[in-house]
């Protein structure tokens, strides 16, 4: 049988700096630098649409913890004969399980986002969150429930992992204390090891003391990962996230079983001389890093190329329009050939003759948002995981209609002439209901503390809206929790459904000076541009593919 670092009783206590050892060192350095470069690339672009929802901090924390273990294991062939097994016990007993736990916890974010985005798939004018007053003190159970609901997904993940790791660390320390394998002065009799220093070192590398670490790995790889795979079976996104999640789940299945086989099957001894048992776990970590870091890098580059192609196509189309090209071949020729593309071309041309029938212009997007936004809204929520963008535009449009604010069909700089634009008819009186409706839009889509999925605004646009709404938002939030005392949260007064219905928080303060009917105008422009260059081309391609498949089936 082998040991954790691949040593035997005959192994000499000296570093193995031979050809294989040098290869492992060089490979570890090159792969580490490559990984850090790719992670830096993603971190610098963490605010892009495709990365904002992925929860990079927790994912990167798990990757870095596991990679430190990977480094120790990959170079373990070199220093293994000199390293005490007790050091490997703590590394594999605490460091590795924490990294695996953080990684797989972040891996479940895919399911959370897929489920949470479903609420954006249907158009609604109602707020996603209703703030209600809490009369009097609340019970312990309700207090814990309220505290848990107020945490975002990342904090819930960290809290869950923290509880699990606390139990695991406690068990690991308990195993270490009761076994005499690593110390002779205390512990259960009969658990000590004897022999030469190398024989003792070899015997310390296996045994029941390592079971907590094995259980933790098997739990995540063979229980949590298959559960994620099952739940993700019907989710088909455009960002490669499902592929990444499936790849990560499959990559970890072999690690713990092969590690056990390498330790306890005598026939693996020749392999262990060159490929120490923990290297099977290192192979798994390598694939996890590929799917978690390098696949998103590829997806980010693909998204940037698609956005650039869209902008270049629009530029070519506008250039032809300026030179009098009315044959509608520029962008339409790239995506034509399907019945849906033809319908969209006719719809786009109905907006204005100068649009030329293109389906990738702002005119066509505006027409879709006005006449038939449901397919785009469903696609953005269920496929692109950016449903908050279209939902925001629909809420603003409904808010304007409810308060008699006209909406311009074209953005500044669009291709239509000035006489084709619908004039704005500003609201003369800014009612409290109008401000409260806008406040709920801010809370649902823009607020840094309340919005589950923030729309991706530039810093100046966000600060401008924050200056208008943040004070009012805090008043509403604080009024909801005004009777909640964190120092003494556990007391009386349960509340029935009638009380809940009557306790909805309404904003009663003054309307800020910066508020008017065009308060969301710049945010609308920004989000429409974001949709035009990211979600809209994917939506066009998907519908084109769908129509092509339908046409082939009817032949």
Image (cartoon, rainbow, N blue to C red):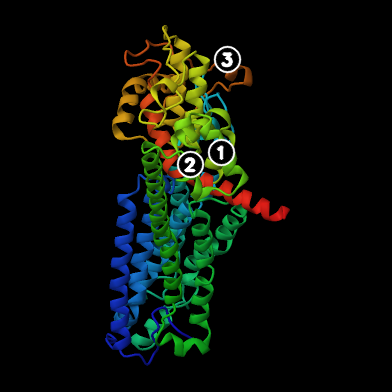
Q: Nearer the viewer, residue 483 or 501?
A: 501
- Disc 3: which residue: 502
Q: Nearer the viewer, residue 386 or 538?
A: 538
- Disc 2: which residue: 327
- Disc 1: which residue: 344
CA gap between label 2 and label 1 equals 16 Å
**Residue 183 sits in quarter:** bottom left
Which class describes the residues within 10 Å of circle 2: few (<14), some (14-19), or many (20+)? Answer: few
CA gap between label 1 and label 3 equals 47 Å
Disc on the earlier residue, 2 or 3 = 2
Question: What's the residue at 44%, 22% (across, down)?
Answer: 420
Is the C terminus in the top left, top right, bottom left or bottom right quadrant? bottom right
Q: Is residue 14 left or right of residue 493?
A: left
Vertically, is 64 above or below 159? below
Q: Picture coordinates of residue 343 (x, y %)? A: 59, 39
**Residue 378 sits in quarter:** top right
Q: What SS does tag 1 mark?
A: helix
Q: Nearer the viewer, residue 255 or 532?
A: 532
Q: What SS does tag 3 mark?
A: helix
CA gap between label 2 and label 3 equals 61 Å
Q: Nearer the viewer, mark 2 or mark 3?
A: 2
Q: What SS does tag 2 mark?
A: loop
Disc on the earlier residue, 1 or 3 = 1
């Amino acid at each position: 049988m082998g040991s954790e670092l691949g040593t035997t009783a005959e192994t000499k206590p000296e570093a193995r700096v031979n050809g294989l050892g040098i290869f492992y060192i060089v490979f570890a350095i090159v792969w580490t630098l490559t990984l850090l470069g790719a992670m830096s690339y993603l971190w610098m672009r963490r605010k892009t649409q495709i990365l904002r929802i992925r929860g990079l901090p927790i994912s990167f924390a798990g990757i870095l913890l596991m990679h430190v273990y990977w480094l120790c294991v990959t170079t373990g062939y070199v220093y293994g004969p000199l390293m005490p097994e007790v050091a490997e016990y703590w590394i594999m007993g605490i460091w590795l399980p924490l990294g695996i736990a953080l990684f797989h916890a972040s891996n479940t974010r895919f399911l959370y986002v897929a489920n949470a985005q479903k609420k954006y798939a249907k158009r609604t004018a109602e707020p996603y969150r209703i703030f209600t007053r809490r009369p009097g003190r609340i019970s312990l159970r309700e207090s814990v429930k309220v505290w848990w609901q107020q945490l975002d997904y990342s904090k819930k993940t960290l809290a869950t992992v923290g509880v699990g790791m606390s139990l695991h660390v406690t068990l690991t320390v308990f195993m270490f204390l009761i076994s005499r394998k690593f110390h002779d002065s205390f512990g259960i009799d009969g658990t000590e090891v004897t022999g030469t220093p190398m024989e003792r070192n070899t015997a310390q590398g296996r045994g029941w003391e390592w079971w907590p670490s094995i259980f933790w790995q098997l739990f995540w790889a063979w229980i949590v990962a298959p559960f994620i795979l099952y739940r993700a079976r019907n989710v088909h996104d455009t960002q490669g996230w499902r592929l990444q999640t499936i790849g990560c789940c499959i990559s970890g299945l072999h690690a713990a079983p092969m590690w056990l086989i390498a330790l306890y099957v005598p026939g693996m001894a020749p392999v262990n001389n060159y490929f120490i048992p923990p290297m099977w776990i290192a192979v798994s970590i390598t694939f996890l890093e590929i799917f978690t870091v390098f696949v998103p890098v590829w997806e980010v580059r693909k998204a940037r190329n698609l956005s650039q192609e869209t902008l270049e196509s629009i530029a070519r189309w506008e250039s032809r329009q300026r030179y009098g090209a009315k044959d509608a071949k520029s962008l339409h020729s790239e995506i034509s050939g399907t019945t849906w593309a033809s319908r969209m071309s006719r719809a786009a041309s109905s907006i204005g003759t100068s649009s030329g029938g293109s389906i990738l212009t702002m005119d066509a997007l505006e027409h879709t948002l006005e006449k038939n936004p449901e397919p785009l809204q469903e696609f953005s929520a269920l496929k692109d995981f950016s449903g908050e963008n279209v939902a925001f535009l629909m809420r603003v449009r409904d808010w304007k209609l409810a308060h008699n604010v006209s909406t311009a069909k074209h953005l500044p700089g669009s291709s239509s002439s000035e006489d084709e634009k619908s004039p704005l008819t500003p609201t003369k009186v800014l009612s409290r209901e109008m401000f409260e409706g806008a406040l709920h839009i801010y809370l649902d889509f823009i607020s840094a503390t309340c919005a589950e999925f923030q729309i991706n605004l530039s810093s100046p646009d966000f600060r401008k809206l924050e200056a208008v709404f943040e004070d009012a938002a805090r008043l509403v939030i604080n009024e909801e929790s005004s009777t909640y005392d964190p120092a003494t949260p556990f007391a009386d007064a349960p509340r029935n459904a009638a009380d809940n219905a009557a306790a909805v928080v309404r904003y009663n303060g003054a309307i800020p000076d910066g508020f008017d009917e065009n308060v969301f105008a710049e945010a609308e422009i920004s989000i429409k541009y974001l949709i035009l260059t990211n979600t809209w081309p994917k939506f066009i391609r998907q519908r084109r593919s769908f129509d092509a498949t339908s046409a082939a089936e009817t032949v």
